[in-house]
Image: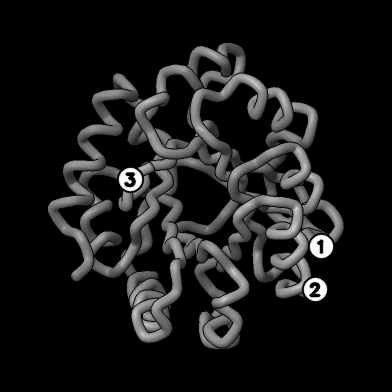
Amino acid sequence: MTDQRINPSILSADFVNLQSELEAIASADLVHVDVMDNHFVPNLTMGPPIVERIQAVSPIPLDVHLMISDADRWAPGYAELGAYSVTFHAEAAAEPVKLARRLREIGARAGIALKPGTDPEPYLEILPEFDQVLVMTVEPGFGGQSFMADMMPKLRRFAEAKRASGLDLWLQVDGGISVDTIGIAAEAGADTFVAGSAVYGGVPEERIADLRTAAAAHRHA
């Protein structure tokens, strides 16, 4: 796995041919699996049975992003399926630290995601409890939205906190990531990039390589 990670989102894949779509992104670092429940966000995607099958056939590890209510109850089950990383939303967890510790105990990396309107300050002091912070660069719930560049100050705030504390923390961005926007996020401190249509809108292997090149050209100092 590289130090700048490209995680294609299968939200943009052909769900009828999901196994071949997974094989097409074997050159990526992780596969980003968007779980939506039609409660926390106004869309419905997949649940544990499908994620379990993805886990069984994917050539690369799973980066599960839970856009679901009551994350405290449901998130551990995705770690138990074998996901490499499980990210839940700060807005959907009653006890985020307790939940993160449970995910780590099971064996998954623990991630916390923040919607565009969520203030990062309350989460800075608990960063050591997490392996990843996901700064949403669109409103969660749908693919194909435009990148929100005004989220970069939030990303920089987390990057500053990471640098000051020396934490081994991945900073992920999700939403509107393409060869035109990935550099903006990389300069602001992101090192893990979720891309859907930017990967599956062409030849995935070529698109992944292009994203890597663009991100590396703008690596955060």
Ranked by sequence position, the earlier of labels 1 and 2 is 1
Classify mark 3: residues with Cα within 10 Å, few (<14), some (14-19) or many (20+).
few
Give the mark nearest the N terminus, 2 or 3.
3
Gap in Å between the C-alphas at discs 3 and 1? 30 Å
Asked where in the image residue 28 lies, by quadrant, the reply is top left
Quadrant containing the C terminus in the rendered view: bottom left
Which mark's residue is nearer the viewer, 3 or 1?
3
**Which residue carries the number 3 mark?**
2
Specify the amino acid type for callout 1: Asp
Residue 114: horizontal and vertical position, in percent? 56, 68
Q: Which mark is residue 72?
A: 1
Secondary-structure class at tag 2: loop
Q: Point out the image quarter for the N terminus.
A: top left
The three-letter amino acid code for the residue at tag 2 is Ala
**Between 113 and 116, which is closer to the camera in this rendering?**
113
Residue 36 horizontal/vertical position (percent): 69, 45
Residue 89: x, y in percent? 65, 63
Contact flag, marks 1 and 2 (Cβ < 8 Å) = yes
Q: Residue at x 72, y 47 (%)?
A: 79
Image x and y of residue 132, in percent: 52, 62
From the image, tell me which residue sits under label 2. 94
- Mark 2–mark 3 Cα distance, whole angstroms, equals 33 Å
- As shown in the figure, which amino acid type bears the numbered disc 3? Thr
> Relative to residue 158, is residue 82 drawn left or right?
right
